[in-house]
């Protein structure tokens, strides 16, 4: 099975929830979040337990603005890893994108609405009155949300509150990741 590395900048909740759904945990969890108080408590507990059980550190903290060298110091430890981004709020350097297989879930239906590329597309879809929102999984390139879109899933947001939109897209994201890992047999190669 290929090593799975999961990156995040926010809470890490999606990684925790996806791991529970898949029944597989990342070989390494990487964050540039400096304040651990806002990180999902369950993810921290499971990671600590798994690190002790496996007798290896599976948690890696990058600087707030990682360099190519910072990325390489983590990635070089793994042979042929698959890397997923879960709210990782950094543009990955071109050298890293070209060398590694990296996927991102973007919570904007950019195959239908390219204007939703970039930061906070869920809120923009809501405030601009879109009837449909959704998520895509795409290959990561050094351009913001520019990589090839591999999977997409939409959801009607008509009549929803903003909190409802966030909830619907969270569920959509988890469904899409599960479909992606299954369809592309990501962890089986």
Image: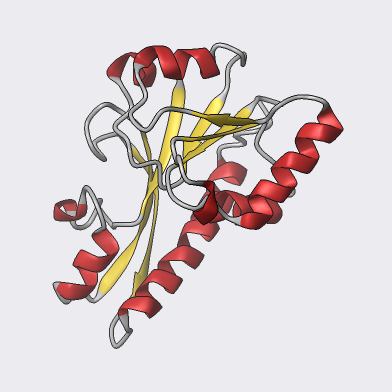
What residue lies at 82% left-to-right and 33% top-to-bottom?
52
On the image, the x and y values in percent for residue 141 come to 30, 28
User: Could you say which quadrant of the image residue 28 lies in?
Assistant: top right
Q: Quadrant of the C terminus?
A: top right
Please tell me whether residue 156 is drawn above or below residue 63 in the rendered image.
Answer: below
| Residue 24 visible in the current orientation | no
Judge from the rendering whether residue 14 lies leftward or rightward of residue 2; answer left or right.
left
Residue sitting at 72 percent across and 49 percent down? 45
Report whether 99 appears left or right of 111: right
Q: Residue furthest right?
A: 53
x 56%, y 37%: residue: 184
- In the image, residue 18 lies at what x, y percent? 61, 52
Position of 158 relative to 63 (above/below): below
Residue 74, how many percent across, how many down?
53, 18
Q: 6 or 1, which lies in front?
A: 6
Observer-nearest residue: 182 or 124? 124
Q: Quadrant of the N terminus?
A: top right
Q: Is residue 109 above or below residue 92?
A: below
Give the residue drawn at x 44%, y 50%.
Answer: 10
Measured as percent of width and height from the top left, residue 156 is found at 33, 76
Q: Is residue 91 above or below residue 93?
A: below
Q: Is residue 65 visible?
A: yes
């Amino acid at each position: 099975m290929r090593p799975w590395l999961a990156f995040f900048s926010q809470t890490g909740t999606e990684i925790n929830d996806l791991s529970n759904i898949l029944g597989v945990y990342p070989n390494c969890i990487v964050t540039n979040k400096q304040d651990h108080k806002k990180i999902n408590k369950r993810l921290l507990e499971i990671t600590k337990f798994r690190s002790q059980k496996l007798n290896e550190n599976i948690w890696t903290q990058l600087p707030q603005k990682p360099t190519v060298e910072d990325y390489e110091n983590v990635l070089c430890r793994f042979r042929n890893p698959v890397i997923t981004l879960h709210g990782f709020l950094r543009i990955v350097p071109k050298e890293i994108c070209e060398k590694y297989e990296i996927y991102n879930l973007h919570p904007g239906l950019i195959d239908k609405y390219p204007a939703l590329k970039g930061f906070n597309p869920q809120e923009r879809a809501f405030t601009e009155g879109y009837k449909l929102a959704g998520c895509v999984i795409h290959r990561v390139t050094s351009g913001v949300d520019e990589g090839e879109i591999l999977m997409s899933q939409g959801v009607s947001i008509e009549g929803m509150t903003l909190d409802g939109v966030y909830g619907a897209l969270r569920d959509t994201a988890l469904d899409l990741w599960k479909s992606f890992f299954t369809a592309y047999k990501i962890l089986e190669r």
